[in-house]
Image: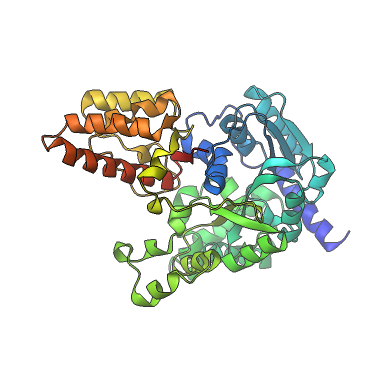
Amino acid sequence: MGHDAEHLERVRAQYDTAPYPRIPLHHAHSEDTAMLYLHNLMTPYYLRNQRVVSGAGKRILDAGCGSGFTSLALAQANPGARIVGIDLSERSVAVARERLAFHGFKSAEFHALPIERVGELGEDFDLINCDEVLYLLPDPGVGLAALTGALAPDGILRANLHSAYARAPVFRAQKFFQTLGLAGHRDEAEEIALARQTMERMNDGAQLKKDAWTPFASLHDDSEWYRMNYLLVGDKGFTIPETFAMLADCGLELVNMLLWPTWELRHWFKSGQPPPLVAAQIGKLTTAERLHLSELIHSSHRLIDFWCGHAGQSRHRDPMETWDAGDFAASVLHLHPQLATERLKQFLLDCLEAGEPFNFNQHMRVPYGDPIVIDGMEAALLPLWDGPQPYAEFERHWVRLAVRRTTVARPVFEHTARGELRRFVRRMESLAYLMVEPVG
């Protein structure tokens, strides 16, 4: 057995022993708007194309589906889509199949198949989700290339790699325990017990304990946490330059990071104002260079998590900051499906009745943007739940309600109200909560 085959066999055995994630079958995503938002094809498709697309009839692959937890999210976020899952572990595939059937998705297909052999399915996919997998492969680039071959021409691939910077303490812990003979060489329960005992007995001032144990106090009783961190077989870390090099080798280009506002370089400077040394360079930097500087400043993300697609598929988008009145007038507003729910509409109605403020961010935790201030215009939002709204029509509705709330001269205030609406739309659009689709 070659080195790569032996490595994959150890990974397979690890997940056959304990399919991941270990979440009860009955657990659904119906109330988890953030999970559904990130797994809805509409989110990355809009970010790339500034067009709204439905998941109905689309082909979606969950590559490395594990126990089917993300497969379920993909099915619930994209009604009418065809769901296919593959995983190296036969036991994981069995659990995934059972999970999807339990929730009524009996037509979902699952195959015990390694990612490198995804071409054997003989089809391509509109959306491929490869979550928490590539960094375990002997050569992640080979896996990414295989997925690229199964991606439809206009398709979008979501994948991620462990951050070499953010996960450095855990990598040290893995090396520590591997050197001591753990990580797959004994009974798993025994290895977990030995790892816990070792970390507990370590001096509190030891750097390894401070960095890789103490911050995770709430997880010290969770056996899965040890398995997926200290004892994880094949784990590897990457940087942004290494990630972009891998994308280029596969003929892929970035659509966006999953939590893109938190990667904004300006975010790491006081009041969002970079000092002269940085400000002078920002406009000259490539996307990869800006992201790399951000990870060097503050590696807060365990995962380098991104959407990508075939190079050359991205549609040129004029920044909304450059739009004039005519651009806005020639557009249609769509509230994201994970916000356009009856539950959230009822919450808005309850806020209106109680005279309390309404904040979109408290219902959609991702992608962690700044709070969106409605400033007393909550009632003007209601038409968004009725379906797509021509901007010009929505603007008239917004201005009419705004005028009722003021004693300022009408012509002056109408101009002010239009400006406030544009700021609101830009803020919502920057998080893809509101999708602004040009007409024509």
Where 221 sits versus 68, above or below?
Answer: below
- From where the camera sits, is residue 393 visible? yes
Question: Does residue 61 lie above or below 134 as drawn?
Answer: above
Return the residue nearer the eye: 63 or 26: 63
What residue do we see at 57% from left, 49% from top? 225
Q: Quadrant of residue 93?
A: top right
Q: Position of residue 154 (x, y in %)?
A: 67, 45
User: How many circles with numbers are drawn on the protein?
Assistant: 0
Please give the name of the residue rendered at 42% of the width and 32% of the height, measured from the top-left corner.
390
Residue at the left extreme, as displayed: 407
Q: Quadrant of residue 191?
A: bottom right
Note whether residue 206 is visible. Answer: no
Locate residue 237 relative to residue 86 in the image: left or right. left
Does residue 337 appear to the left or right of 175 in the view shown? left
**What is the x, y in percent for residue 229?**
59, 55
Q: Residue at x 75, y 56 (%)?
A: 145
Q: Which quadrant holds the N terminus?
A: bottom right
- Quarter of the rendering containing residue 231: bottom right
123 or 383: which is nearer to us?
383
Q: Nearer the viewer, residue 94 or 208?
A: 94
- Residue 23 vs residue 11: left or right? left
- Residue 233 in the image: state x and y as whole percent: 69, 57
Estimate the x, y position of residue 180 in percent, counting from the top left: 66, 66
